[in-house]
């Protein structure tokens, strides 16, 4: 509301805020904004009606949520122990979507955004929906026009809130009367295999195996944790002990039954079958070696 123009993106305002704070605080800075952007689409609008001639003069309004990360004058700042870089910006967007109940993943850009570094930008995609956001390193030429330390770096990302589908309905059930059990799974696999694909392979494998079980109350995957997820991604480790180009993904699968306790032996047999099936599916689908650690 303090701006006298209709903004086509939120980056300019975030850079103004960064500029004011960086002049007073040399430490890393993170800022965000939820606001509207405006654009005049080319060509005819959808659902044109009697007011089409006037509508062409009016902009489309879209609500965005955007962030800007700044690593300080040295560019080597950290946020909660994680290096401030494009990976962190993308991870924050994915985390925000996950908190809303959406499963998203990163994808290459279909067309480059001029105010981001051409080699450091990517899209955020939801399957069946398409691109719902973008992120990357702010172009060095743009930062050079601001009163910021020479050679500093900043990372920008945003989500198009109006591109998101309706939020999934969370259905709550009764509190289980019987304890559940969980199994941790550590996979070593190429960094090119998205975590969402790993979770999907485990879900597909679990559906095929668990539905084939006989009995009145067979073992099944059950939601657990704050997000009520049957399969949780706990850690994505890339470092000492892991070959270059690969990562160790730590997951947790939760098992239970409706009216009885599940034994460790029972859960282990089913868990092993699900893991082996998912391992084969990932290896075939991505033509990559997937190892259980």
Image: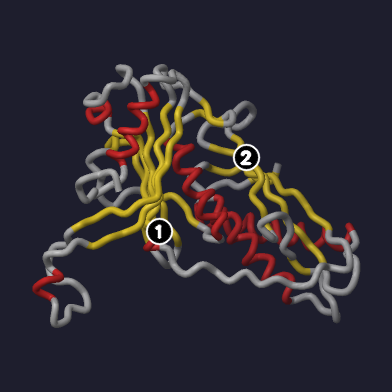
Q: Position of residue 169 (x, y in %)?
A: 58, 71
As drawn, 250 above or below 86: below
Label 1 Cα crowd, 10 Å radius (few <14 / some 14-19 / many 20+): some
Number of callouts: 2
Q: Position of residue 148 (x, y in %)?
A: 31, 21
- In the image, is 84 to the left or to the right of 218? left
The residue drawn where x is 41% and y is 17% is: 74
Q: Secondary structure at mark 1?
A: helix
Q: Position of residue 22 (x, y in %)?
A: 38, 23
The quadrant of the image that shows the C terminus is top right
Q: Position of residue 182 (x, y in %)?
A: 79, 55
Residue 161 image label:
1
Please indicate, yes or no, whether residue 83 appears anywhere in the rendered image.
yes
C-alpha gap between disc 1 and disc 2: 32 Å
Q: Secondary structure at mark 2?
A: strand
Report which residue position mark 2 lands on: 248
The residue drawn where x is 27% and y is 22% is: 147
Determine which quarter of the picture holds residue 248: top right
The residue drawn where x is 48% and y is 23% is: 77
Label 2 Cα crowd, 10 Å radius (few <14 / some 14-19 / many 20+): many
As drawn, 164 above or below 105: below
């Amino acid at each position: 509301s303090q701006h006298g123009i209709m903004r086509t993106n939120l980056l300019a305002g975030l850079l103004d805020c960064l500029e004011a704070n960086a002049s007073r605080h040399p430490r890393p800075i993170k800022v965000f904004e939820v606001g509207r952007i405006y654009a005049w689409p080319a060509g005819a609008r959808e659902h044109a009606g009697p007011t089409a001639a006037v509508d062409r003069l009016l902009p489309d309004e879209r609500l965005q949520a955007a962030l800007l990360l700044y690593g300080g004058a040295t560019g080597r700042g950290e946020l909660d122990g994680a290096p401030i870089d494009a990976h962190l910006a993308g991870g924050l967007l994915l985390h925000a979507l996950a908190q809303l109940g959406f499963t998203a993943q990163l994808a290459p850009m279909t067309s480059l955004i001029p105010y981001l570094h051409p080699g450091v930008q990517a899209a955020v995609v939801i399957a069946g929906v398409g691109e719902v956001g973008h992120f990357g390193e702010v172009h060095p030429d743009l930062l050079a026009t601001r009163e910021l330390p020479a050679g500093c770096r900043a990372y920008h990302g945003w989500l198009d809130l109006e591109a998101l589908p309706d939020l999934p309905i969370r259905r709550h059930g009764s509190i289980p009367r019987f304890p559940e059990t969980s199994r941790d799974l550590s996979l070593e696999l190429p960094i090119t295999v998205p975590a969402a694909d790993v979770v999907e392979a485990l879900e597909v494998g679990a559906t095929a195996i668990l539905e084939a079980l006989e009995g009145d109350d067979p073992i099944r995957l059950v939601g657990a944790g704050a997000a009520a997820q049957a399969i949780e991604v706990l850690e994505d480790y890339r470092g000492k002990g892991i070959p270059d180009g690969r990562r160790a993904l730590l997951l947790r699968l939760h098992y239970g039954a409706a009216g009885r306790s599940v034994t460790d032996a029972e859960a282990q047999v089913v868990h092993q079958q699900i893991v082996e099936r998912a391992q084969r599916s990932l290896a075939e689908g991505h033509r990559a070696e997937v190892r259980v650690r």
